[in-house]
Image (tube, rainbow, N blue to C red):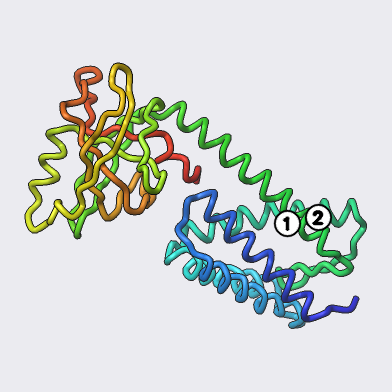
């Protein structure tokens, strides 16, 4: 069959961006539009390997694995191992969707050197396959994340501020809906003693990080919590970016003799991914 270079590049360019985007969503891998675009361009050019004859199965697999690792390095800010695994998981799923699409619509296609080329395909076919893959993967991600939230009560959160990192035990509070009124992002709540420990770090100007967070609760209407914006925070190894830590005016209760916590987190802090 005839292979059109522009179609070959375009198909793999678009599918590359979609695969990288879905991989980042599933595992909360940090990326950007620029990184996704570069990754798509690399996928487009790499697809021309299909035109090289007699590479051999083992060499073809080796080249594909090396390329996938390079792609993960560029697209996911050096998260090579996790990124590569997610790329293959999403690619395998979308490959299955592509085979179903070929079967249903009877579109001709060919594969060589671990690259797939679809012949007589319209943009509507591409859009349909992409939308179906996106909906199914994101639905799967949300269902599994929700299941994890039911099973998880406590977690650790590492707060980073001007090169210093402090780790606290946190309770996942499903009733905590505290938001930053400016950005709409979730706000973490820290106990009075843990906040004092955080503020005891030397050479940090907490005055310029100071902010006020309005809140409502049972028996309290239009309350105000003092807070501080930190540089970054990590939950289960996932970066949350700059968040606000609001200070509670007392200590949190101890749950049992061994489990105690210093921070309250809403479920929004855990909804970024399942992998």
Say which of 106 and 160 sits in front: 160
Left or right? Give the position of 23 relative to 191: right
Q: CA distance from mark 1 to mark 2?
A: 6 Å
Secondary element under disc 2, as helix, strand or loop, is helix
Q: Is residue 210 above or below residue 53?
A: above
Task: Tell me which residue sits at (51%, 37%) in the image.
Answer: 145
**Residue at image location 68% in from the left, 64% down from the top:** 15
Q: Up-down: is 94 above or below 16?
A: above
In this image, 95 relative to 158: left or right? Answer: right
> 216 above or below 112?
above
Q: Nearer the viewer, residue 177 or 118?
A: 177
Check residue 99 in the rendering and tell me which mark sits there, or answer none.
2
Corner quadrant of residue 79 = bottom left
Mark 2 burial class by Cα count in 10 Å: few <14, some 14-19, many 20+: some
- Give the residue displayed 48% in from the left and 62% down from the top: 31
| Count of numbered labels shown in the rendering | 2
- Mark 1 lies on a secondary structure that is helix
Q: Residue at x 12, y 56 (%)?
A: 204
Badge number at residue 95: 1
Query: Where does the image place residue 243, in percent across and percent down from the top left?
Result: 32, 48
Residue 270 as seen in the image, left or right of residue 221: right
Which of the two residues, 57 or 20, is positioned nearer the viewer here?
Answer: 20
**x and y, in percent, of residue 263 in the image:** 25, 34
Q: Residues within 10 Å of mark 1 (few under 14, many from 20)?
A: some
Q: Are marks 1 and 2 in contact (CB under 8 Å)?
A: yes
Location of the N terminus by quadrant is bottom right
**Quadrant of residue 267 within the rendered picture:** top left
Q: Is residue 141 left or right of residue 158?
A: right
Q: Position of residue 165 (x, y in %)?
A: 20, 51
Residue 52 horizontal/vertical position (percent)? 74, 82
């Amino acid at each position: 069959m005839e292979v059109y270079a522009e179609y070959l590049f375009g198909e793999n360019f678009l599918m590359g961006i979609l695969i990288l985007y879905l991989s980042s969503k599933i595992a909360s891998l940090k990326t950007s539009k620029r990184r996704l675009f570069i990754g798509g361009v690399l996928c487009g050019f790499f697809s021309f390997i299909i035109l090289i004859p007699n590479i051999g199965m083992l060499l073809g697999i080796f080249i594909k694995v090396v390329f996938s690792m390079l792609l993960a390095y560029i697209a996911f800010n050096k998260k090579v191992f996790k990124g590569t695994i997610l790329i293959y998981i999403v690619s395998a799923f979308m490959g299955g969707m592509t085979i179903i699409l070929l079967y249903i619509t009877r579109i001709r296609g060919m594969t060589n050197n671990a690259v797939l080329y679809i012949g007589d395909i319209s943009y509507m076919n591409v859009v349909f396959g992409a939308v179906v893959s996106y909906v199914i993967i994101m639905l799967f991600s949300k269902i599994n994340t929700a299941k994890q939230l039911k099973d998880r009560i406590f977690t650790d959160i590492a707060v980073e501020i001007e090169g210093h990192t402090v780790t606290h035990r946190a309770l996942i509070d499903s009733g905590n809906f505290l938001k930053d009124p400016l950005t709409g992002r979730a706000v973490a709540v820290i106990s009075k003693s843990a906040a004092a420990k955080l503020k005891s770090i030397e050479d940090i100007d907490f005055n310029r990080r100071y902010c006020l967070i309005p809140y409502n609760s049972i028996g309290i209407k239009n309350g105000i919590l003092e807070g501080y914006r930190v540089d970054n925070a990590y939950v289960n190894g996932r970066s949350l970016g700059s968040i606000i830590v609001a200070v509670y005016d007392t200590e949190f209760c101890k749950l049992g003799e061994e489990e105690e916590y210093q921070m309250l987190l809403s479920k929004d802090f855990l909804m970024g991914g399942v992998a």
